[in-house]
Image (cartoon, rainbow, N blue to C red):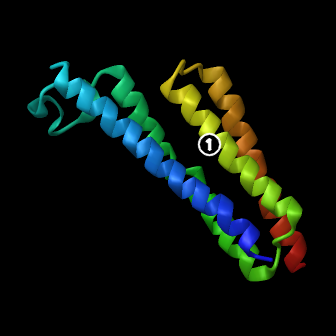
Amino acid sequence: MTIKLIYPALAQILWTFVVLCIMFQRRRVAFASKAVRVADVAVSTERYPEPARLAAANYANQFETPVIFFALIMLAMEVGATGTVMAVLAWAFVLTRIVHTFIHVGSNRLLKRAVVFGLGVACLFCMWVGIVVTVL
């Protein structure tokens, strides 16, 4: 049943909104603490303090590999590749995005972040393979 893939897609969309809220909150704090002025960031966001820049970078990340995720979800639903394995891979991808955010806006340890990112990409690749196998 295709509904199994709707839930992780909705969860990823929700997570994007969560990251947006984190970014807005960190920017609000930057303005409130006078760490930055509107004129400082009117043209470029480079002058925001690091926590706000990290949140903004992570928000931008939510429109990179997740775009592939959403395309794969739609393709899987179209061709009927909606079994348990596909649902588990979809949920695993969403989990990697959440963990990636916590690392990115937290400790920002690049190696940990890269490993989690790689796991997410591996989930996407496996989803792609599942779709290809279904259509062949």
Q: Is residue 2 above or below residue 92?
A: below
Q: Is residue 20 above or below residue 30?
A: below
Counting from the top left corner in percent of width and height, residue 132 is at 84, 70
Q: Residue at x 42, y 29 (%)?
A: 54
Quadrant into which the C terminus falls: bottom right
Residue of label 1: 97
Nearer to us in this view, 128 or 31 = 31
Q: Residue at x 71, y 44 (%)?
A: 120
Crowdedness near tag 1: few (<14), some (14–19) or many (≥20) residues, C-alpha within 10 Å: many
Q: Is residue 97 above or below residue 67?
A: above
Nearer to us in this view, 35 or 4 = 4
Nearer to us in this view, 64 or 90 = 90
Quadrant into which the N terminus falls: bottom right
Counting from the top left corner in percent of width and height, residue 29 is at 26, 26
Which residue is farthest left? 39
Counting from the top left corner in percent of width and height, residue 81 is at 83, 73
Which amino acid type corresponds to the residue marked 1 in the rendered image?
Arg
Res. 97 image quadrant = top right
Nearer to us in this view, 71 or 34 = 34
Res. 102 image quadrant = top right
